[in-house]
Image (tube, helix red, strand yellow):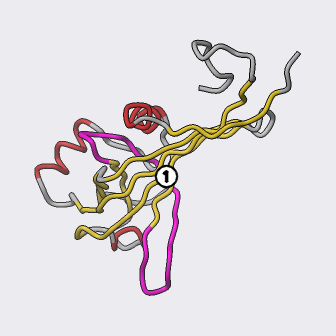
Amino acid sequence: MSELDHRFHQLSAGTCRQRLERVSIGRVGWSNQKGPQILPVTYLLHDDNIVFRTDPHGPLAKLQGGEPAVFEVDEFDPTTRCGWSVVVHGRAYSTQRSQRATQLWREADPVPWAGGQRPLFISITLDELSGRSVERHREDVDDDEDPVWR
């Protein structure tokens, strides 16, 4: 029996998109006068954009005019010490008063977990997409076999 170890692997753009589509909670990061900020949101991947709803008077409402933003999703299993992470670099735009907002209400309404009114849609473009996984690897496993974590 060979010993198991863990290896990092880069995820393809296609795999990154699939992971973005299957997860519903991520973290938005941006900078303001206080420095780096990170908040969790419920979201959807719609028309190649990360889309979430927020309070028009909350901290995320500052992300309306093309500000740089990062978005991250992940899954980890502490028992197997395996997991993955996908990071999006893009720009954030408001879709509050537009045909796009009407389309989002109709087609892709991401329902926030937080209470209160959250009518402001924010979209983050997928300008740069990257991801990596840490997987268990066995030296004597054929390359054609699936890793333990996918």
Query: Nearest the camera: 53 or 79?
Result: 79
Relative to 138, 124 lies left or right? left
> Magenta stretch mostly in which secondary structure?
strand
Q: Place residue 107 in its image quadrant.
A: top left
51 up-or-down from 122: above or below: above
Relative to 41, 141 lies left or right? right
Query: Nearest the camera: 107 or 47?
Result: 47
Check disc 1 and report the residue beneath it: 72
Q: Place residue 111 in its image quadrant.
A: top left
Q: Residue at x 43, y 86 (%)?
A: 33
Which stretch is magenta?
30-49
User: Is residue 33 on the magenta stretch?
Assistant: yes
Q: Look at the image and tell me in which quarter the C terminus lies.
A: top right
Q: Residue at x 43, y 70 (%)?
A: 30
Q: Amino acid at mark 1?
A: Glu
Q: Look at the image and tell me in which quarter the N terminus lies.
A: top right
The picture places residue 57, in percent across and down from the top left corner, at 36, 73
The picture places residue 144, in percent across and down from the top left corner, at 57, 13
Q: Residue at x 62, y 13 (%)?
A: 145
Query: Nearest the camera: 3 or 31?
Result: 3
